[in-house]
Image: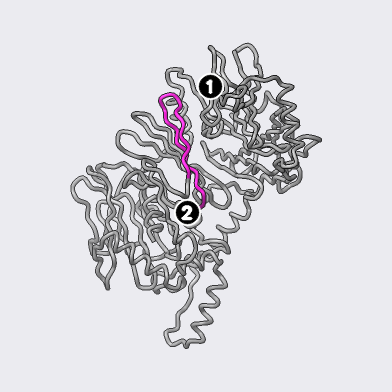
Amino acid sequence: MRVILLFSWLYILGISHCILPFGDSTLTLDLSRFNSLRSQPNRGGVQTDDGVVQGIPYKSFFLNNGKSFGELTEGRVTIWEAGQDEKCTAVNLYYKESVELLSIYVRGSHGSRLVCFEKVGRTWKSISENKLEARLEELRTLPICMGSPDRPNPVLFDLNDVIVTGYHQTPREYGHLEETVEQGQKSEGAEVEEDEDSDDEESEDLTRRLENHLSTTVRNLLQGKGTRQHHNTTLDIRKAHGSNFWVAEAPINVTMYRGFFPEDDSIKKIIDGETVLWSASVRDSFQNACTFSTHHLILLKVNAKREGITTPHCLEFKEGTWRMIEYKKYSDKLAHILTRGEKNIEIDMERVPEDLGNVLDYVSDGYRTISIFPFKQFKIRGVHYNYTSIWSSMGEEFCSSATIYTDENVSLSRVTVDDGQEKRDHYYLFSTYEGNVVNPKWKEITFDDLAEYLKDFKDSPENLKSFEAELNIDKADEDTARTRMHVIDGVVTIKREPLPANRIVRVVDSDGPIWEARENQRCLSSESYYKRDHLTILILLIQTDQALELKYHEKIGDTWGVLRDNDIEEKINSLYAH
């Protein structure tokens, strides 16, 4: 049941950063003015949000105009009043049948705390956080369609999960998501009358009709079954250890990178000591997280998946305080701490942070391929694989791309080096023995040697297999590709990376085909740019034999056109300018 509290804390923490911690202007929140569940215009600057989490309806109240709550009342009854240097930045109200609970997020000069209340008769009584958690656990098992006359519970289900009637940061092309939201809005305010004199048969019929509206997932949640209830695992970024995830570590200059990768979907909360940094809602699935740490700053990015789309949640720790930041600010700060003082950057190909460049991982012709194309603000001066050095810069030269080829027995590498005048490819083989002496290291080979090894990979009867597949850029198909999304200045960017065993030979959208492979071609990734709910630009990374090229497309109306290389940067910049 702590999932509900953590959901509330994360939600409150997010909106509280839009509120000044202290100021001269405070408001009184009167709950009696919000006695309906239906969404309504803000009153006196108070913003509201409502929905259902784990079968419990809730309503949140907050301010986004720099003010805060100094008092919480219900009519003429005072529930809570701020002490010295205290302000309430957000309130959560939970209700079901005749039970009403409150959690109030209070900020003060000595930190933050959660103040909890339960309504007994007409009186609000203070309770502990543990008591609130226990009461929420009891509410979870109650039927979800029973409401008091003045607070009729909305029916907010879709066939896959519980709907939260909130803002979906998703382009209009994702029709299945929009239909889900519309279903929630249409059903909002629906009432189920309860006949106190109904017999057992009528009760069974009501239960049967209710269950027809619930998916197996939701029913399991209500009954306390399933992994969501029994695997609420916590990941502490300072003391990360556990059997259900693994940690990758690599020093980058004076910055320490740590990546956290789960073995299953059991991680539901990320903390730093006693501070909750992120917690999963009912529909969220933790994908991975990473930190970049210096002596004065920690950057944290948590990737969480919802409806098949992965989005980043970014935070920074500075001067003893964690705060949420936008993805763009996270990227800018990361570039600054990694490149300040023109320090050299070295990478390990087995654990490359995705924030350093475009990373590809796929199966081709019997072997696994890992490639990185660093972002232009980073100068890679050294390349490693599993802590073993492959290449190091001898001066001003830097790595513009690097690739590992491996069949799990033999490992090869290609490193493209740019000295400012020209680019040169260097080829390497990982050798365990030097003569009869065990001396594992990378040794330089020729292109012909590399080609011969790759041919052996392909001809091996035990080679790794890949399968032809189609990529639809309008659908988040988890069996075909990984999907990541972020929003900067109103521009939605969606990146799809095919799963390693999928050989993408066609790229389509809901209007028809976009690209089709010729002989020895495959699509390694797609990057879509949306503005005002319309797909505008699509970039495809295409592999032909061992060569890579980018294909640029623009959609005008329902028609796709091809963009020239020298037009793409101007087109993307124009999206952010308007």
What amino acid type should be assigned to the residue bearing mark 1?
Gly
Q: Position of residue 250 (x, y in %)?
A: 46, 31
Instruction: Indicate the quadrant containing the N terminus: top left, top right, bottom left or bottom right.
Output: bottom left
The residue most toward the right is 519
> Position of 129 compared to 249: left or right?
left
Name the residue: 50% across, 67% down.
Answer: 220
Which residue is label 2 attached to?
266
The residue most toward the left is 84
Q: Main secondary structure of the magenta part?
A: strand
Name the residue: 25% across, 51% down.
Answer: 70
Q: Position of residue 111 (x, y in %)?
A: 26, 44
Name the residue: 40% across, 41% down.
Answer: 324
Local secondary structure at mark 1:
strand
Q: Position of residue 319 (x, y in %)?
A: 30, 33
Which residue is label 1 attached to?
382
Which region shows up in magenta?
Answer: 246-265
**Quick one: label 1, few (<14), some, or many (20+) residues within 10 Å?**
some
Q: In the depicted view, which residue is nearer to us: 133 or 323?
A: 133
Q: Splitting the image into 4 quarters, where does residue 6 fall?
A: bottom left
Q: Position of residue 49 (x, y in %)?
A: 42, 56
Residue 255 part of the magenta segment: yes
Q: Splitting the image into 4 quarters, where does residue 403 fall?
A: top right
**Quick one: label 2, few (<14), some, or many (20+) residues within 10 Å?**
some
Q: In the depicted view, which residue is nearer to us: 163 or 59?
A: 163
